[in-house]
Amino acid sequence: MARRATPEVNAGSMADIAFLLLIFFLVTTTIEKDKGIARQLPPMEEVEPEDVIIKQKNLFVVNVNKSDQLLVEEELMDLKDLRQAAIAFLDNGGAPAGDPLYCSYCKGQRDPASSDNPDKAVISVQNDRLTSYKMYIAVQNELVAAYNFLRDRESQRLYGWKFTEVKKAIDEGSFQGDEEAVQEKLENIQQMFPMKLSEAQPKKQGQ
């Protein structure tokens, strides 16, 4: 009796279906982008840097404990009040008139016990290992917002536009105008209020 030939399975159509499914998932799947804080890291140096010595009055210490409680200058503070406290510190201008550190554009209280000049003012953020990431980000956002507020104020006064809006337009490639000239103005504003956020513990010096 003759043996029947085993029918072959046409795999061509299955390969087409698999290919179509692959394209479908590639098109419809959304990949989440990692979110973080924009920080420019210092260049690597072969020689270990020396400990920075800062006058106590030029140092604004922000401490976050393991329970996400905020301790600013050794006093408990709500997160909503942190931005204004940082602005008052950065904008204080405590150096007297005639002093090389005198800040002519500062509009703070000019308290001699607080920061001399925005260029000397350092904000030191110290976190516990058990501080939540959410609280860490929230604190960083408030401090960066303090710098941006002061930069916007000065750019509005000097040039008639906000620092943050113009910088964002340049970063996104949507700025229309003389970008080179504007970059110089942005750098000028950054020099007026340089962002000095430290997560180290610099050595303190007396008043």
Image (cartoon, rainbow, N blue to C red):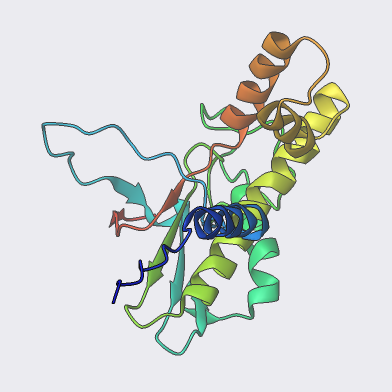
Q: Quadrant of residue 114?
A: bottom right
Q: In the rendering, at what x and y percent does residue 31 appear? A: 57, 58
Identified at 52% across, 79% down, the residue is 70
Q: In the rendering, at what x and y percent does residue 83 appear? A: 67, 63
Identified at 81% across, 35% down, the residue is 162
Task: Name the foreground residue: 78 vs 110.
Answer: 78
Q: Quadrant of residue 171?
A: top right
Q: In the rendering, at what x and y percent does residue 201 appear? A: 30, 60
Q: In the rendering, at what x and y percent does residue 116 appear? A: 53, 43
Task: Name the foreground residue: 87 vs 168.
Answer: 168
Question: Is residue 13 shown to the viewer in this render?
Answer: yes
Position of residue 122 relative to residue 170, above or below, is below
Q: Is residue 77 left or right of residue 154?
A: left
- Residue occupying the far bottom of the picture: 67
Task: Name the foreground residue: 80 vs 164.
Answer: 164
> Which image quarter is the N terminus in?
bottom left
- Residue occupying the far right of the picture: 160
Q: Is residue 81 left or right of residue 137?
A: right
Q: Total marks drawn?
A: 0
Question: Is residue 113 shown to the viewer in this render?
Answer: no
> Which image quarter is the C terminus in?
bottom left
Identified at 54% across, 75% down, the residue is 134
Identified at 30% across, 72% down, the residue is 3
Position of residue 116 relative to residue 59, above or below, is above
